[in-house]
Image (cartoon, grey):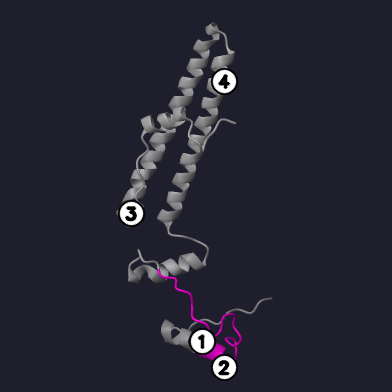
Amino acid sequence: MPETPERKPEEQSWADWVEEKIQEAQKKGLFDNLKGQGRPLPSRRNPFLPQEQQLAYDLLKDSGHTLPWIEEGREIDQRLNQARTRLQRRYCWYQAERERRPGDALLALEQVWQQYRRDFEAEIEAINARIRIYNLKVPSLAFHKPIIILEEEYERLRRGAPDAPCP
C-alpha cells in the first residue's frame, strides 16, 4: 500500500512548507545528477503574453495543454477543413453525375446538389458563429480569424483549388 503523503501543518505557510520540502530533498541528494544540470534553461517566454500570465501559460504547456482559445482555434480550423473537404467530394460527384446522367434525371441531381449546398451553408453559419465568439476571447487582433464568406468558398470550389482536387 502506498505511503500517505505528508500534509502541510495548518500553522505553516505554503511558501515555508514548500521551502522546507525543497531543503529536505536537497539534503537527500534528490537534485543531484539531474538531466541538463549546469546548462541554462531554455527560454520559454511567450512574447505575446503579459508577465503576470506567464506562469499559468508554462504550467499549461508543461502538462501537455494549451490555452483554451488556442485549442478552440484549432477546432475551428479542423471543422472548416472537414466542411470544405466534404463539399469538394460532393462537388466532384455532382460534376461527374451531370456528365453521366440523361437530361430527364438532371432535376433530381440538382435537388441533391442544392441540399448539399444548404448543408454546407448551415455548417459555415455555425463555424462563423464560433469564429465570432473565438475572436472575442483572443488576446490580440493578430489572432483573429476571418469570417468565412460563402461566395468565396464557392469560387474556390469552382476554381478547383489545388489543395482540394477531385479524387
Q: Which mark is residue 142?
A: 3
Q: Earlier in the sequence, mark 3 or mark 2?
A: 2
Residue range highlighted in magenta: 22-45
Which x, y percent locates residue 12?
43, 86
Number of other residues with Cα within 10 Å of mark 2, as a class: few under 14, some 14 to 19, many 20 or more: few
Q: Which mark is residue 22?
A: 1
Closer to viewer: mark 3 or mark 4: 4
User: Rounded to the nearest whole Å, what is the CA distance between mark 1 and mark 2?
Assistant: 9 Å
Q: What residue is rendered at 55% in x and 82% in y?
A: 6
Q: Quadrant of residue 37?
A: bottom right
Which x, y percent locates residue 24?
54, 90
Q: Quadrant of residue 129?
A: top left
Which x, y percent locates residue 106?
52, 11
> Is residue 41 on the magenta stretch?
yes
- The reply to whether callout 4 and callout 2 are in contact (CB within 8 Å) is no
Number of other residues with Cα within 10 Å of mark 1, as a class: few under 14, some 14 to 19, many 20 or more: some
- The reply to whether callout 3 and callout 1 are in contact (CB within 8 Å) is no
Q: Earlier in the sequence, mark 3 or mark 4?
A: 4
Quadrant the N terminus occupies? bottom right
> Is residue 56 on the magenta stretch?
no
Q: Amino acid at mark 3?
A: Ala
Q: What residue is rendered at 49% in x and 40% in y?
A: 81
Residue under numbered circle 4: 96
Q: Amino acid at mark 2?
A: Lys
Quadrant the C terminus occupies? top right
Residue under numbered circle 2: 27
Q: Amino acid at mark 1?
A: Ile
Asked which secondary structure carries label 3, the reply is: helix
